[in-house]
């Protein structure tokens, strides 16, 4: 009976580890995506002005 409980706890610990690992990757990716989109929304002509400055 003790080995069944130990296996269940090990499985639960592994599931929690990989769930937290996925959140550690997804949360910063979401934040960086929102930051990039907000920058693009505020300055939609930034890429055009940079191209014009390089050609001038």
Image (cartoon, rainbow, N blue to C red):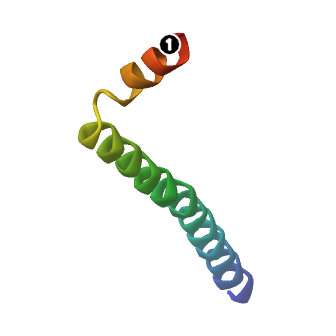
Rendered view: 19 above or below 48 = below
For the residue pair 50 and 11, the one nearer the viewer reads as 50
| Left or right: 4 in relation to 44 | right
Rendered view: 46 above or below 35 = above
Residue at 37 percent across and 19 percent down: it is 48
Question: Where does the N terminus fall, quadrant-wise?
Answer: bottom right
Badge count = 1
Residue 7, given in percent of the width and then of the height, sits at 69, 75
- Read off the residue under disc 1: 56
Residue at 64 percent across and 84 percent down: it is 5
| Left or right: 21 in relation to 51 | right
Q: Residue furthest front?
A: 56
Q: Quadrant of residue 10?
A: bottom right
Residue at 70 percent across and 83 percent down: it is 6
Q: Residues within 10 Å of mark 1 (few under 14, many from 20)?
A: few
| Left or right: 27 in relation to 3 | left
For the residue pair 38 and 18, the one nearer the viewer reads as 38
Residue 51, given in percent of the width and then of the height, sits at 47, 17
Residue 28, given in percent of the width and then of the height, sits at 50, 58
Residue at 37 percent across and 30 percent down: it is 46
Is label 1 in a helix, a strand or a loop? loop
For the residue pair 50 and 33, the one nearer the viewer reads as 50
Residue 11, given in percent of the width and then of the height, sits at 64, 70
Q: Residue furthest top?
A: 55
């Amino acid at each position: 009976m003790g080995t069944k409980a130990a296996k269940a706890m090990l499985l639960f610990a592994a599931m929690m580890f990989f769930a937290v690992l996925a959140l550690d990757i997804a949360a910063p990716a979401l934040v960086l995506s929102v930051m990039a989109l907000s920058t693009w929304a505020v300055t939609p002509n930034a890429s055009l002005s940079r191209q014009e400055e390089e050609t001038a």
